Image (tube, grey):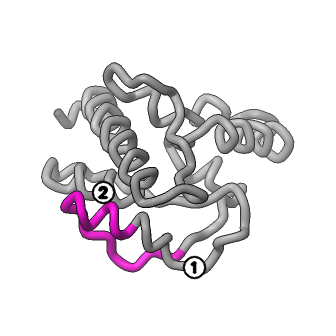
Amino acid sequence: MAEVIFKEMARPLELNWEADSAGTGSWHRGQDMDRRARTALVGTGFNPKTHRAKQFIESYFYDRNLIIALDMEHYEDLISLDKHRNNGKASSKIKLLMAYADNSPTLEVPDPYYGNEGDFKYALGLIEDGVRGLILKLSKISGDE
């Protein structure tokens, strides 16, 4: 959901930024997004195109300017992978999305996978807040605001 939300929120600003998403595990690789995620996105006015899940690969530490995790488990997985495969060189690129949110009650987006549609809607709202703050921060850094 975060990739779709980021791309759609950044598009009207005509920013030359790229975003994609990848999981820390391989269990959903090649699959479309969860139907509940798609339903939540469409119900909130987003237009999720075809999405194929992929797994985070080591080259992303070099290729990406910023690596965003939605929860502490993924954050810690990324920090550990960076430490063991990249000597910790990319640790400053790894951030929690909700650290960018304005007045968020949490630093994590809870994984809605084992929940219901309401959990996906809640996660979507948190992601929107985090993405809004992230875009604002990146706009200021790049001078694109």
**Residue 21: in magenta span:** no
Comes first in the chain, label 1 or label 2 = 2
Q: Is residue 38 left or right of residue 97?
A: left
Look at 32% across and 29% down and name the residue there: 137
In the image, is residue 125 above or below residue 106?
Answer: below
Give the labeled residue for mark 1: 31
Q: Is residue 5 left or right of residue 114?
A: left
**Residue 47: in magenta span:** yes
Q: Amino acid at mark 1?
A: Gln
Residue lying at the far left of the rendered structure:
12
Q: Position of residue 134 (x, y in %)?
A: 35, 35
Q: Residues within 10 Å of mark 1 (few under 14, many from 20)?
A: few
Q: Position of residue 98 (x, y in %)?
A: 45, 32
- Image mark for residue 7: 2
Q: Amino acid at mark 2?
A: Lys
- Image mark for residue 84: none
